[in-house]
Image (cartoon, rainbow, N blue to C red):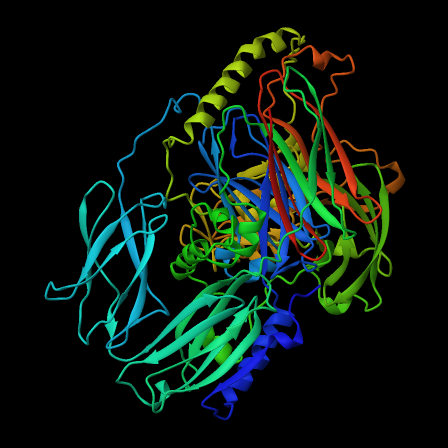
Amino acid sequence: MSHYRNGALLIALIFILPLSSFSQALDSVMNIYANNFPQEKVYVHFDKKIYNPGETVWFKAYIFTGADPSLFSKNFYTELSDADGAIIERKVFPVLEATSAGNYDLPKTLKSRHLHFRAYTTWMTNFDTAFYYEKDIRVYDKKTDSGVTVVPQQALIQFFPEGGDLVAGVESMVAFKANDQYGLPVKVKGVVQDGKGKELTSFDAEHDGMGKFPVTPDKGDSLIAVWKDEHGVERRTPLPEVRSIGVVLRTITGHQKILFSVARGAEGGPEYKHLTIIGHMHQHLVYKAKINLDENFMSGGTIPTAQLPTGVLQVTVFTDMNVPVAERVVFVNNNEYSFSPQLAILSKNTNKRGSNNLQIEVPDTLKSNLSIAVTDATADGDFPDDDNIISHLLLLGDIKGYVHNPYYYFSGTADSLMNRLDLVMMTHGWRRFKWDQVAKGKLPLIKNPESDYLSLKVEVLGIDPYKIAKEESLNVILSKKDSSTQMLQVPHLTGIKFGVTGLVFFDTAKAYYQFNVNRKLSNEAAVTFNTGLVKGPRQARPLTRIYDGWTAEDSLYLRRNRFVMEEAARIQPIIDQKIKTLEAVTVKGRQKTDAEKLDEKYASGMFAGGDAYTYDLVNDPYAVSMMDIFQYLQGKVPGLQIVTANGPGGTPSLTWRGSTPSLYLNEMQVDAQQLQNTPVSDVAMVKVFRPGSGVGFGGGAGGVIAVYTRKGGDEKRNDANFKGLDRATLVGYSVMKEFYVPNYLETSPESVQEDIRTTLFWKPFLLTDKDNKKVSIKFFNNDISKKLRVVLEGVNEEGKLTHIEKIIQ
C-alpha cells in the first residue's frame, strides 16, 4: 500500500510564471527516482541493551521504503565488528514480509567492551552508506568495568543557519547544537558578537543542548559566539560566513500545513529573482511552486500536509539556473502512524522459576508482524525515550547524525514538543539527492541489483565462449544440510555464464552438476559457482567516539551485569564436575600431511611440489568466513601486498617485489576478478610460489598464486547417489538459532542447574491476521530476577507501527 495519492501533489504558482524546462525535467526525474530507485531504511529490535560475554544477541529487523514495508529486498546483511573496526562475524538472512531475524553468539573470551552492529540490504549497497542501520553494543567487562567513571567533558557547539546560509541584510533563524566528545548533549548559553565586539543577541539551550536565535547580519560581518558550558568554561566559536548574495528559507510548522517564506539579499543577479520551491517526501514530489522576487525581496506560501504520511519532508529552493540555494527539513506529524495491540499479563510469578503467561491481541483484521522480548529488569532503570521502531523508521532513518532520546519527540502532541522536534530538524542534515546530477537527469548507478533470494551463478573459465553451445545447460542436484535435495536445470545465459534465482537454503549445500550437451566441459575448463550475495567490506569503520566509562544511569546496568557474571563464574565449576572427559590417545608416526595429500591430488606438472606456501582450505574452519581468496591470503604471505581498489568489494591489485603475481585457477591462467568471484567454500588448496620460481607462463617473475577448487573426497561425505558428478560447495544463508525456553513443569537435568538467563523469552515472528487475532505466550522466570521487562514491537500490513513496554514485578 502506498501512502502517496495523486492528489498529494500540489502545484502552486506565486506571482504566476511559466514552468521552465528544468521544472518539467525535475518532475520527470523525481518520478523515476520514486518508481525505480526506492530508498530503503532498516530498524532492528534487539532483545536488550547491554550484554555479557558468552551471551546471545537476538535481533529482528524491519525494512521499509518510505512509509511502507518494503517488498523489494530479499537479502539482509549484518556485520558485527569490534572497536577497531575488525569484522568479527558477518551473517546474511532471508527477508520475509519485509522483516528478517537472526542472532550472534558472543564468545566467552570476548575482549572488546564495545561492539558495532551494522545492517543493510542488497539494494541499500547502491546508495549512501550513511543510511545503513548502525548501533553500538556495550559489553560488560568484569576486569575493567568496576564502577561509574567520571570523564572530563569536552564541550563542542555547531551553528546551523535555517535554509543553509547567513545572507547580508536578511533576518535568519540560527539553530545550534552543543554536545560533548561522545555526542551527548551539553547545556550552554552565550551571546553573539559582530567583528567589532558589539553584542547582537543572546542564546540559551532550550532542550538537549539545542536552541535557536534570530540574527540580521550586515555585509562583511564576521559573527562570533561567546559561550559557556554547564561548568562555566568560556569558549569562542565563529558562526558560518555571511554571504552578500543568497536566499534565506524559513518555515513554521502549523496544523496540517507548513508555512514558508523565501527572502533574497539586496545583491545578486536575476537568477535570484525567479525561484522554484519544491517539497518532497520519500522521493515523492508533493509540492512545487514558482516564486517571483522581481519587485519584492520576500514571498511565502503554504504547503498542505494533511494528506501526507508522518515523516521527514524536505523543502528545497532552486534558482532559474537549476542551482539549489536553500534547503530545510521539517517533520510532518499527522499522528496516523501507529496501531495498538493489547498486551495482557494473564498471570505473573517473579519467584524462582515462576510461570508467567501473556496474551497479545490485535483487534483489527489486518495482518501484523511483531517481535517480543522479555528480559531481566531488576536493576536496569527506565529509559522510555530510547530509540525504538517508531522513532527510527519515522525520524532517524531519514536524517543523519546522532539524536539523543529520539522517542521523546513522539511522547505527546504539545506545541512545545513539536518546537523541540523542529530544533532536531534544523540541526541535522538530509542528503539523499545530489541535485547537480538530478538537474542533468543522471540516475544512480546500480552495481548490485536486488535478486530473488539466493542465486546459482555459474561461470565457465579458461575456455573460449564460442565453444559453449547456445542450448547448453546444467543439471544440478542441490544437496542441503537437512539431507533434502533439490533438482535444478540451470540455463545458459550468455557467453560463459549460466544462472538461476529464487533459492533458499541455510548453512552450506553441495551442488552436484553435469553439463547436458558437452559433458566433458567441466574437465576442459574451470567451473565456478556463487550464490550472488554481495561481498561485504574487509574492514568496518572504527568507533571514534567511544565512552569507556559508565554514566550514572548506566550504573544500575553495571551492578546487575557484574552480579550475573559473578554467578556464572560461581556455578561453572559445578557444571564442569558433571562433565566426564576421556584422555586423548596420541599415535606417533610420520604421516603425510593433509596439505601434502592435496598437493598430490591437485597439482601437476610445473605446479607439483616445489618451494611454495601451501594452504589447506579443506581443513581450515575459518576459510569459509572469508569473502574471497584475496582476503584469505592477506597477511599470510610475507612480501605479498594486496590492495583493494574502489573501496570494499572492489577488484584487488597485487604486487610482490615490484611485480604483479600471475594468477591460476585449476592451473588455467585467469585475472583477479575471475579469481575473486570464486567462492572460498569451493577452494581446496592454494599454492603461492615466490617470485622467480620458474613456475607458470613467463617464469613467474612476480610470483604465482595457484588456486584449486575442490574435487570429490575432500570431505567425509555420503554421496554414493551422485557418483560420477562434479561437485561444488555453496554458502547459503546463516542459520537462525531457535530461542530455548525451559519448561520447569517437566523434570529434566537442566532444571537442576542454576538459571541466570537475562533474556527469558524472545520470539521474532509473532504473526496475527483476521482469523488469528490472539497469541498466548508462556515462559518461566530465572533464579535471580524480581522485575521483568516486556517489549513488544512490530508493524501491520498498512505500515503502521507499534511499541509497547510493560513491567512485571
**Looking at the picture, how far across and down is residue 353, in whole percent?**
67, 17
Query: Which residue occupies the foreground of this view, 764 or 210?
Result: 210
**Looking at the picture, how far across and down is residue 775, in whole percent?**
77, 37
Compared with 310, 298 (above or below) is below
Residue at 53% across, 53% down: 132
Count of labels in the image: 0
Query: Which residue occupies the foreground of this view, 141 or 508?
Result: 141
Q: Is residue 482 visible?
A: yes
In the picture as drawn, the residue positioned furthest to the bottom comes out as 18
**Looking at the picture, how far across and down is residue 83, in whole percent?**
43, 38
Query: Which residue occupies the foreground of this view, 559 or 141?
Result: 559
Residue 305 falls in image quadrant: bottom right
Compared with 77, 418 (above or below) is below
Compared with 734, 516 (above or below) is below
In the picture as drawn, the residue positioned furthest to the right comes out as 721
Quadrant into which the N terminus falls: bottom right
Query: Which residue occupies the foreground of this view, 769 or 246?
Result: 769
Compared with 481, 128 (above or below) is below
Residue at 65% across, 65% down: 3
